[in-house]
Image: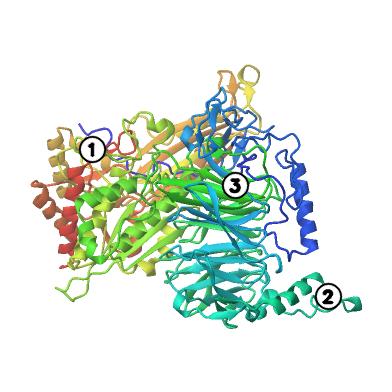
Amino acid sequence: MIPPHNNIHESEYASHDRQPLPISSIPSTENLISTPRGHTPIRLNSPHLSMAELSLHNHRHHQASTASPSSSSGLHGEQQTEGRSSSAMPHFSNFSPEIAAAAEINRSSTPCSLEMSSSTDGMIIINGNGNGNGNAHVNGTTTSSITKSPSTVTHDEAHVPQLVHKWTHTHSILCCVALAKNKLLYCGTQDGKVLVYNMDTYSLSKIIPCGSSTEQPISILAISLNEKEDFLFVAGSDSLIKVYDLKTPECECTQVVYSLVDIGDIFSILWCEITSTIYIGAQNASILWCHVSLDEKKLIEKHHHDLEKLPHFRYDKFFDSKGPGGSQNTLQTQHNLLRRSSTRKTRVKLFECRSEDIVRFAHNGYVYCLEVVHNTSIGNSNDKDFLLSGGGDGLVNIWTFGDNTLKKLTSLENDESVLSMKIQGSLLYVGLGDCSINVWDLMTLQMIRSFRFGGNYDEVLSLDVYDNCIFKACSSTGLVKFCAMTHSSNVCDGIITMSVPEEDGIINAVKTFSIDSKTYLLAGGTKSLSLWDISEPNELKEQITSPTASSNNSIAKRLTNDDLLCMLKKYVGYKTISKNPQLYLEESRHCAQFLSKLLNKFGAYQTKLLPVENGNPIVVSEFKANSTADKSKKTRLLWYAHYDVVDATKNEAIDWSTDPFVLTAKEGNLYARGVSDNKGPTLAAIYAVAELYDKQELNCDVVFVIEGEEECGSVGFQQVISDNRGLIGEIDWIMLSNSYWLDDVTPCLNYGLRGVINASVTIKSDKPDRHSGVDGGVSGEPTMDMMHILSKLMDPVTKKIQLPGFYDNVLPLDKDSEKLYDKIAEYLGIQAKTLMVKWKEPSLTIHKIQVSGPNNNTVIPQLVSATISMRIVPNQDLEVIKKSLIETLTANFNDLNSDNHLLIEIFHEAEPWLGDYQNQVYSVLYNNIVKHWGQEPLFIREGGTIPSIRFLEKCFNAQAAQIPCGQSSDNAHLKDEKLRVLNLYKLRSILTDSFKELGHT
């Protein structure tokens, strides 16, 4: 008998309810990580802030704080601490206590939102009473115990961030950075200091004054480090960038960068190690850059009065003119005294930004943040290094840099001011002025998700991302850990609140870093700095997007079968479930980037991620033939695969004997979701090509086309491939491995698949749901009408489909094919007719019928809906069959003279495919299967559908061939999906020889 699990690799999740991008996640409440209490004027705390700006901000903050029981702070850092607990321990508190912590995802066809229910069950409380009962003390700080509500949510206690230490200061902490190598924390303050804290002793080890009390008061607004962590870059409201040598005992200022242009406050700086350049985002909407030498030998001594030409001493005709009576203001007096008294020398080198090294009006607003991206593809650009800037105009501008110039590549438009940014892999997280966070895929330039939170006047001043959790620092609601990508249907499984009861208010900066396999979060806010342990249990030490390594000399070592298994372990670890983009969209993007980087490491000529509207991107990568044996025209192969999988979480994972997304090896098999369909075969093909390329034995060009929506009917695939046909080029042969053997012992070659038409048929009455005892028989009932029209689609005796001319183009069975069927039937011990019904004859199936109204025996439903499918076979015209189906259903319905209404929707379709099993590719594969397996393969067809094969054949005018990898017992789409290790290795060997041989012909 043919195993029942065979041939189920097709588009299981095809649906007419496809969710558009970006996906909107809108929690109606937030939990807070509140450390500092008290209000600091606006985001940047600048002395240059106008009274109009300050007044507007204070008005907004007052509105936000009066609406929030968590905000009870005053202006300018004045604390209002009435009735507050003195405990310094974290605790959970709801931003809106009347709103619930339980949530469920609205799975309607509209953009996804996360809606909160009205129950408070499931909230986790961290008891911070500080009374010592059950609490441990570490380095003088009290760790928190955990209390759960009676309806305990299944949170792992280790997932709750733990407060490690808290420090206070007289002014606000505006920016921070960690030196992981030296276990030091550097924090820029509102009063012009850089505070240095030692993580070994949790003590303040040094204060670096960046502006003395005799000078104009400044605020440190931005801080950065070089790669070696031995130079610190500091910028702020004095329009200067000061470079401090951290190797010296006193952390001396050794370089100063300034501009002759009045740029105002410096809101962001970025040190680029590759070009030894400091990039500057300024208040006057410009971006500047300056090449800075960090070589100590080139330092020169300067008199202090030589610094008079710097911006904060520069004479201003308006502000520095004498007032009525000829008197000077206090600031002028301080400057003059400093000029007259300064005779000391300092070893410092001045760097002036050249007038040509500036992009004026880079934004139509302040330039709040800068990020740099190296060795990454963005859009269709061939450059690999980019500068990203976020501004008050709501734009993220992407710049290419080289030859001391900036050229704008493109802009990403957001609805509000861009105040903060964070890059993780190929994803850009953008914090906005309305408390929203947008997520952009840089490789496809698509906005894929938008997180929206309550509070229109709450600004995301800073954010960081760790382990699929977003830490956002806000101007009103403090610090929020939002784990919206934890794959839970309950949004509160993803929102965790950390709070220090006696302090609450603005958080200006957050930064994550790792030391000794632990991950920490540093949060600076109003007069306070807090350090949190955010390490996850059993956290992976491997980077989520980086296949290991690197140099060409090491490629050969990486191409072993052991390394293939290592990469497969990473590959299946991505939950690329295309059915649920609201939960797994980011993981699918990370997986696509993983493939892209792996292909590039192996020597791909070019690799692109092609964006799909409302879907996961398509990976297109080309390897050029590099064999020196033959210089003639090269054969070009296209290898088709997919990286998305069917679901194996929650209820689907209950019956699994292993974790579906952790590769488990036992009894000679590999167990994981997607290991057989289709991730294992995909890597086998990649490693086969990479091995030939590394040995300079690749005789043909190979183009990989790997999509992420196959399980959902290949959404957008045909349009994207058609639009990028020029990028892919001419193709001679198409190959794939997305099928299975008929049993567990005999290799097979697949040469045919049926097509499919999925339709939804709905009949609706103008009358509401009615009672059969009152209205039964009065008028035509939708359910009865549905029974009539569906019953006429098939003859009840012959089982033939009753569409006009339906069987006219079905191909007759030729003698060669008949021999193949007889051979398989004899081998399996079944009748050849059974195989023909399964593989080469069309069929009709009614999958489900649903009705409206309550589920009881007396209701006449107002609406009835049926889902049907038709399997069509090669040589039948899909468009003709589809039109005939609609016309037949409509005619049957019209014959009823019913008062009801009929609606027919075709929501998925795919053409049948029939390959030529006698062509060159099948001949080569056949011989290599015999060579490596020691037996002849069976030529088989299948009754299922792969949507893209026939399309690719027609698009590139090339024939396709399929070589199955897995056994019939692989359980694809079912529990305990597996792939035998031997099958994986054999497929790689067969493809290696086949690619090499096809290049010679």
Q: Is residue 982 above or below residue 695?
A: above
Q: Which residue is mark 1?
A: 968
**Residue at label 2?**
328
User: Is 897 positioned to the left or the right of 910 in the image?
Assistant: right
Residue 194: % across, % down:
59, 59
Q: Amino acid at mark 3?
A: Trp
Q: Earlier in the sequence, mark 1 or mark 3?
A: 3
| Mark 3 surroundings within 10 Å by alpha-carbon count, few (fewer than 14), some (14 through 19), many (20 or more) | some
- Residue occupying the point 42% across, 42% down: 13
Q: Position of residue 389 (x, y in %)?
A: 57, 66
Instruction: Examine the image and state in which quarter residue 331 appears.
Output: bottom right
Q: Of the residues under marks 2 and 1, which one precedes in the sequence?
A: 2
Pick whichever, 24 or 766, lies toward us: 24
Relative to 292, is 833 above or below?
Answer: above
Residue 8, picture quadrant? top left
Left or right, residue 8 beside residue 582: left
Rate crowding at label 2 as few (under 14), some (14 to 19) or many (20 or more) other CA atoms within 10 Å.
Answer: some
Residue carrying label 3: 167
Q: Extreme right residue here?
A: 325
Task: Identify the image quadrant of the C terminus.
Answer: bottom left
Helix, strand or loop for disc 1: helix
Spatial CA distance of label 2 from label 3 is: 40 Å
Kind of residue sitting beneath label 1: Ser
Q: Amino acid at mark 2?
A: Gln
| Residue 870 in the image, given as x and y percentages of width and height | 39, 41
Q: Which mark is residue 923?
A: none
